[in-house]
Amino acid sequence: MPQYKLLLTPGDGIGPEVIEETRRVVAWFAQNRNLAFAMEEAPIGGIAYDTLGTPEPDSTIQKAKSADAVLFGAVGGPKWDSLPFEKKPERGLLRLRKDLELFANLRPALCFDALKDASTLKPEIVSGLDILIVRELTGGVYFGEPKQTTTLPNGEKRAVDTQVYTTSEIERIARVAFELARLRGKRVASAEKSNVMVTGVLWREVVTRVHAKEFPDIQLSHVLADNCAMQLVRNPKQYDVIVTDNLFGDVLSDEAAQLTGSIGMLPSASLGAKDASGKQAALYEPIHGSAPDIAGKGLANPIACILSFAMCLRYSFGLNEDSKLVERAVDRVLADGTRTADIMQPGMTKVGTTAMTGAVLKALDKLNT
Ligand code: IPM
Ligand code: MG
């Protein structure tokens, strides 16, 4: 029996709470599905800065590299807002992405049937929604150089970020999107700003070429990123897979999250390329962030983190059935009317973080008999 090596990086805000709950789900799988996990924990983000003086400890990066997968909580919070840029908690996450070469970020936005009334959009717009945003994660304006602030002779400041993409960076993320589309609705929409940005022009050219050469069975459309943002609230179900760059993907995935009722529901996977032995670096993370306003109160919705573990079972370990089991358990809990505050609706039962996980574990027990 293989032993899966997990590195847990709880981080800041509600990160430690949702990771603790996910640990219970991992333990359930070890106990009930005959799987073996080795779990280790390491500091990242603000807590790492507080204890070790850096948000991106080398030891954590090393452990992440040798793990089969990283389960990441969240980083950041007002406590660290005034730190210089290089010390900010977010650097920890960005370094993990860069050093592990996690170039493909998968962000599914799935509207559970029980939550179609919880969205701020009309239920008919979001019911049955199932889209996948494939975000490029190690390039673009997040990492482009120069990235600096200088002082001009007249004393005013000038800040520069650089948006940069190469052919191969676009090719590899396009392939991930097309391959995933093959397993779903066979449609890809590529979002960029080719009307304004040369990186957008290159993006469109490369995606078009990869499509024509390797994926003629997939339907490809191009959309300007601003229009995509509008279409996502107008008629989100027109999309199957959306492939886009790092910054547009950051924005569009938050928007897509809200379609599903709550950002507290959405998992993500960040994947690298497979090496010769088939090993693939991977990090799984709820997309909600550290939510400092509710941290430590036992109110956070653990579902996004639990569903991130489901993605880990599928993408890192190939355990599709186990992954589906988690998703079905969450579906059942929601259908039963169990709700954390973020997805609370009239007539439902409001619970906190721990009780929500308890409900998921109970549902797992039932589904597993
Ligand atoms: C995300 C987050 C991060 C990002 C932050 C925390 C650096 O917003 O994963 O979407 O901007 O990529
Ligand atoms: Mg974001």
Image (cartoon, grey):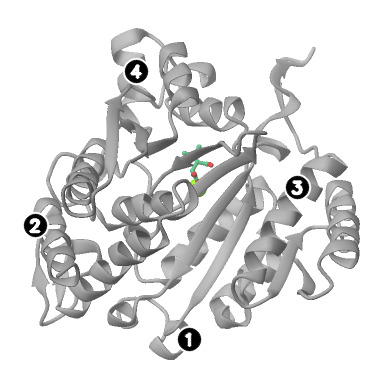
Which residue does the numbered mark 2 point to in the structure image? 355
For numbered disc 2, what is the local secondary structure? helix
Looking at the image, which residue is at 19% across and 71% down? 367
Looking at the image, which residue is at 81% across and 49% down? 171
- Mark sitting on residue 48: 4
Q: Is mark 2 within 8 Å of ligand 1?
A: no
Which residue does the numbered mark 3 point to in the structure image? 172
Mark 1 closeness class: few <14, some 14–19, many ≥20 residues within 10 Å? some
For numbered disc 1, what is the local secondary structure? helix
The answer to which of marks 4 and 3 sits earlier in the sequence is 4
Give the residue type that dot 3 points to. Answer: Arg
Residue 83 visible? The answer is no
244 sits to left or right of 28: right
Label 4 vs label 2, nearer the camera: 2
- How far is disc 2 from disc 1 in space, using C-alphas? 31 Å
Relative to residue 348, is residue 316 depicted above or below?
A: above
Which residue does the numbered mark 1 point to in the structure image? 125
Give the residue type that dot 1 points to. Answer: Ile
Give the residue type that dot 4 points to. Answer: Ala
Label 4 vs label 3, nearer the camera: 3
Position of residue 220 measured from the top left corner of the image (x, y, whole percent): 78, 73
- How far is disc 4 from disc 2 in space, using C-alphas? 29 Å
The answer to which of marks 1 and 4 sits earlier in the sequence is 4
The answer to which of marks 1 and 3 sits earlier in the sequence is 1
